[in-house]
Amino acid sequence: METRQHWLGSRRAIREKTQLPSARRRWSAGAMALIVGALIVGAAPLVSANTESANLRFKVFLDQDPIGEHSFDIRALGKDAQVSSRASFDINFWIFTAYSYRHESRETWRDGCLQTIEATTDDNGKDYRVRGEESGETLDLSVNGESRRLPGCVMTFAYWDRDFLEQENLLNPQTGELVPVRVQPQGTDSIRFGGEQVAAARYKLSTDELDLILWYSDEHGWIGLESDTGKGKTLRYQRMAPT
């Protein structure tokens, strides 16, 4: 077949903010955009055996400090799917909110290709609005009113479906940019999930600007994400077990 989820820009923002000399320095736009984000010319269809209807909720941390949540609502309907996601982050410095981020997106898919997308983002006061609709052999996009056209089967950063790791390009739903990616399997780790340790396959996803580590359990699917902000801080997604 959200989000992205996704994040290129927000990682840069967090990297800059972790150097704050005072509480009043403004946090610029940046790194959450790629993680929040959610590819073009795909291999295997994204609506696959790994795609199931689910509601995934993640707590988000900067090092050990909680900064917000990111949720994904996935509804698989045969070869079709509907995906909605919502992210809300606040990074505080003393009594001040140094950086805030809000993102919502809604996507529809058919045969593994993006059919429609509508995403809105408030990246610390900088607004983005992305709308797109499949039209024949292209995806027609409007990014803050500017039109662009992407050929082929376009896909976003669909972290919730492990098959997305087979792709070579991904659409950032915040900026409307097509991002080249490289993926490397890195063995298996033991990850805590739902009060127990579970075996999880580890993957490294790289772009020109950052590296992400992703973890997948055969039983539970996507359960974690981690990225170095570049200045000694780590941004981390921790899956919340269903109750």
Image: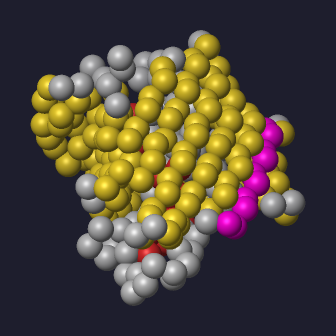
104 or 216, which lies in front? 104
Q: Report which quarter residue 2 is drawn in.
A: top right
Q: Residue at x 34, y 35 (%)?
A: 239
For this view, does 240 lie left or right of residue 131? left
Rendered image coloring scheme: secondary structure
Q: Residue at x 55, y 24 (%)?
A: 74
Q: Residue at x 66, y 41 (%)?
A: 105
Q: Is residue 191 above or below residue 35?
A: above
Q: Is residue 5 magenta?
A: no
Q: Report which quarter residue 127 is drawn in.
A: bottom right
**Residue 146 spot, x, y in % from top left:** 85, 63
- Quadrant assignment for the C terminus: top left
For this view, does 115 lie left or right of residue 204? right
**Residue 207 spot, x, y in % from top left:** 44, 63
Q: Is residue 3 above or below residue 175?
A: above
28 or 21, which lies in front? 21
Q: How many marks?
A: 0
Q: Report which quarter residue 30 is drawn in.
A: bottom right
Of all residues, the one furthest to the bottom in this rendering is 21
4 or 58, which lies in front? 58
For this view, does 167 lie left or right of residue 171? left
Of all residues, the one furthest to the top in this rendering is 78
Q: Is residue 84 above or below residue 137?
A: above
Magenta span of residues: 125-134
For this view, does 202 lie left or right of residue 196? right
**Residue 85 spot, x, y in % from top left:** 58, 37
Residue 216 visible in the picture: yes
Residue 167 visible in the picture: no
Q: Residue at x 69, y 67 (%)?
A: 126
- Quadrant assignment for the N terminus: top right
Q: Main secondary structure of the magenta part?
A: strand
